[in-house]
Amino acid sequence: NFAKVKLARHIPTGREVAIKIIDKAQLNPTSLQKLFREVKIMKGLDHPNIVKLFEVIETEKTLYLVMEYASGGEVFDYLVAHGRMKEKEARAKFRQIVSAVQYLHQKHIVHRDLKAENLLLDAELNIKIADFGFSNEFTPGNKLDTFCGSPPYAAPELFQGKKYDGPEVDVWSLGVILYTLVSGSLPFDGQNLKELRERVLRGKYRIPFYMSTDCENLLKKFLVLNPTRRSALE
């Protein structure tokens, strides 16, 4: 592995930080280019629900990223430990996630890897979106074509190898996240990638008996097979 993360104290502010230590020698030119793109994007972000990059220290062989420490861990682990969230709690968390993604889209950045493992929690259990390794800038009229992210959270058009504008693939992932928060399971699953792909392309998912009509209606705005009909984060 080319990176490790250490917990440290940032002397100027006195706060706990996470330092990502990256061995540049282990990265090929493409991976290095991708890493610098990630850093450039993160440097320009300032939102209460996005992990903050405080400082970048670069030596000849190593890159140190001094980042906000989210002591509450991943939402994924939180769900494993506590089970599904009550809708009131899920609503509050989802509102924070949407606020952060809306901010990204306004800055013409698409995350492309939104999933429960990349949503962190701080000490007060506020959402912090992390891992901008697949993120990219998008410009209206210029389509993207890379399949990014985790298959259970991937939009149907990605499975079909179609080009996409950007924001709409994040919106689909948000639908999967909302379902996961409220039910503790994924809307689309399969024994293998082929089975998962078929289920995503059908766009059919089970509505649990305890899910409110409001939540169900919200899901219907996000998990729309046709990307042009999918809700935008206005």
Image (cartoon, rainbow, N blue to C red):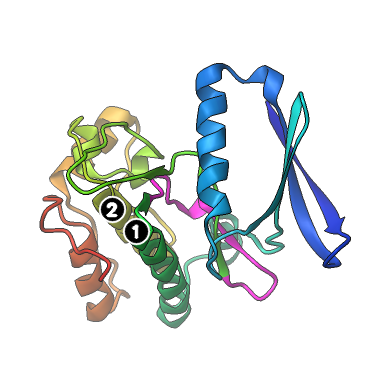
Mark found first going from the N terminus, 2 or 1: 1
In the rendering, at what x and y percent does residue 45 appear? 52, 58
In the rendering, at what x and y percent does residue 189 appear? 33, 43
> In the displayed structure, would residue 207 be above or below residue 201?
below
State the mark number for residue 105.
1
> In the displayed structure, would residue 224 be above or below residue 208?
above
Looking at the rendering, the stretch of residues picked out in magenta corresponds to 110-126
C-alpha span from label 2 to label 1: 6 Å
Indicate the amino acid at tag 1: His
Residue at 76% of width from left, 47% of height from top? 19
Q: Element under label 1?
A: helix
Q: Residues within 10 Å of mark 2 (few under 14, many from 20)?
A: many
Count of marks placed on residues: 2
* Residue at the extreme right of the image, as rendered: 11
Q: Is 191 in front, or is 227?
A: 227
Q: Element under label 2?
A: helix
| Tag 2 and tag 1, C-beta contact below 8 Å | yes
In the rendering, at what x and y percent does residue 151 appear? 35, 38
Judge left or right: residue 189 versus residue 203. right
In the rendering, at what x and y percent does residue 206 appear? 24, 59
Answer whether residue 22 is magenta in the image. Answer: no
Q: Is 188 in front, or is 1?
A: 1
Judge left or right: residue 88 versus residue 33. left
Indicate the amino acid at tag 2: Pro
Q: Is 57 in front, or is 154?
A: 57
Residue at 70% of width from left, 18% of height from top? 25
Corner quadrant of residue 81: bottom right
Residue designated by label 2: 167
Answer whether residue 119 is magenta in the image. Answer: yes
Residue at 78% of width from left, 31% of height from top? 59
Residue at 16% of width from left, 56% of height from top? 224
